[in-house]
Structure formats: structure tokens, C-alpha cells
Image (cartoon, rainbow, N blue to C red):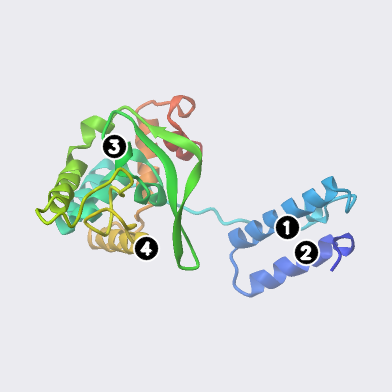
Amino acid sequence: MKISDLTPHQLDTLYGKSSSAGKSPRTIRNIHNVISAALNQGVRWGWIDKNPALRATLPEANPLRIESPSPEQARLLISTCQAMDDLLGAFVFLAAVTGCRRGEIAALPMKLVPGDVLIIGQVRTAVKGVTGIKSTKDWKRSSGPFRSISAGVFQYWQWSNAWSAQPNGAFIYTPESFVLSSQPDGSRFVNLDAVSRKVRKVADQLGMKSVHLHSLRHFAATELLAGGVSPMTQPKCWATQIRR
């Protein structure tokens, strides 16, 4: 179909069929955003006079209700995960104290830690089973408490370094090695879906039915707000979540 022949009615029909096929309102809105952006570009190029997507009817978005765990629940979740598995415990700990997304934690290289400032500049990606790394939209900086609360995570790092420094030299870290890795030499990403499933399982066992890995991102933002921290003065990786 030529874009000059596209009408709001045809877009409404597409969205209606998508809804009948089981797509969520949020997914349909994402599809609409892509179509509308493309049509806006068509307007700029002079291919069409106006964007028909602006008059299309979108389904009501159902807001996601994400429960933020209390400090006591967060501590219990972290300690239980640490007792179960060093890697899982370290991952959950970093998620709770930095407020970063799981892909940002997975892509954290050794060269950026330790220190007073934790810089997040890349994120793990997975598209159709192919994993990789891309830069974040903005280099994000989480500062302040990182050094003082990093002891628990460094227990995991020290254990990994001891493993990597075996006499046979089989596993040696490099600055590019991932801090939290499925391999002793830090050469591979941790399996994010597996981490999420384990956290969800632990939370269920602890009676936290609505808590999952992403809840810890909300927990970090909630704690900052409760402490009187302004979103406008916070590092990017905190402030993004606070504004949301």
C-alpha cells in the first residue's frame, strides 16, 4: 500500500486485529509509535501532507503495577540469594544498590570497578538468541555509596579472582572481563533469564509474590526519594527510574 493511501480507519483496523490476536495494549501502542514515526518522516520528506496515525484510535494502556519491596524484604531477598549462589547474590545486591537494569549489570566490565564511582556505559542485548553489547543512550554514573557498600560483592569478585589465578594460568581476568560472569575468566555473559527466574523463585518462597528482579530497580529509586534525594540532582542511572 502506498502511504498516500493510508487512512486512520485502516490503522484502527490493524490495531483491532492485533488486539483480537492477543497482543497487549502496550504492544499495540509500541507498534503505533513505530508507524507514526515512519509517517512523520514521510511528511518531512514531502511524500505525504499529514500523518494519518495522529488520528488513529489507540487502546487504553493498562499501567503495570510493580511493587517495590521494603528494606527488610530487600535484605532478606539478597541474603537468601547469596546463601544459594555467590553469583546470584552479587547480581541481586548490585541491582538493589545501583538501581541499574539487569542488562547494564551483566555488561559491567572489570575495568570500571572498584572505586567511588560506578560508571555504566554499556548494556547486554539479546536479539533472536544472539547476544551482544551496545552503548547506553547516555553514560550513566552511580556515585556516592558504592565503595562503602561494595564489600559483599567484592567477596564474590575475590573468590573469582582466586579461581582465575590458579597455577596453571587457565583463567586470567582482563580489563574487559565481565564482573559477573558464567565463566571463571569473566568471558561470558551471565544468563539474564536464568537470573530472573531464580530471583522470582526465591521471592515466591519468601512469600513476596509480586516481587521480581526489576522490582529492585524500583526499590533503589524509592529509597532515594524516601531519603529526600532530588531526581534532578541524582546520577543518570538513578534519576531515570525516579522520574518514571
Kindly identify which residue carries mark 4.
Answer: 193
Q: Provide residue 80's location: percent of width, then percent of height.
A: 18, 54
Kindly identify which residue carries mark 3.
Answer: 113
- How many numbered circles are shown? 4
Kindly give the residue lying farthest to the bottom in the view shown: 21
- Disc 2 versus disc 1: distance between alpha carbons? 9 Å
Kindly identify which residue carries mark 1.
Answer: 35
Query: Is label 2 in contact with label 1 (beta carbons under 8 Å)?
Result: yes
- Helix, strand, or loop for circle 1? helix
Quadrant holding the N terminus: bottom right
Q: What is the three-letter code of the residue carrying label 2? A: Leu
Question: Can residue 145 be seen?
Answer: yes
Q: Residues within 10 Å of mark 4 (few under 14, many from 20)?
A: few
- Disc 3 versus disc 4: distance between alpha carbons? 24 Å
Nearer mark to the viewer, of 2 and 3: 3
Q: How crowded is mark 1: few (under 14 residues within 10 Å), some or many (20 or more)?
A: some
Q: What is the three-letter code of the residue carrying label 1? A: Ile
- Helix, strand, or loop for circle 3? loop
Front residue of 4/231: it is 4
- Disc 4 versus disc 2: distance between alpha carbons? 34 Å
The residue drawn where x is 33% and y is 45% is 109
Q: Which of marks 3 and 4 is nearer the N terminus?
A: 3
Q: Provide residue 22's location: percent of width, then percent of height.
A: 59, 72
- Helix, strand, or loop for circle 4? helix
The residue drawn where x is 24% and y is 31% is 147
Q: What is the three-letter code of the residue carrying label 3? A: Val
Q: Earlier in the sequence, mark 3 or mark 1?
A: 1
Kindly give the residue lying farthest to the left in the view shown: 167
Q: Quadrant of residue 122?
A: top left
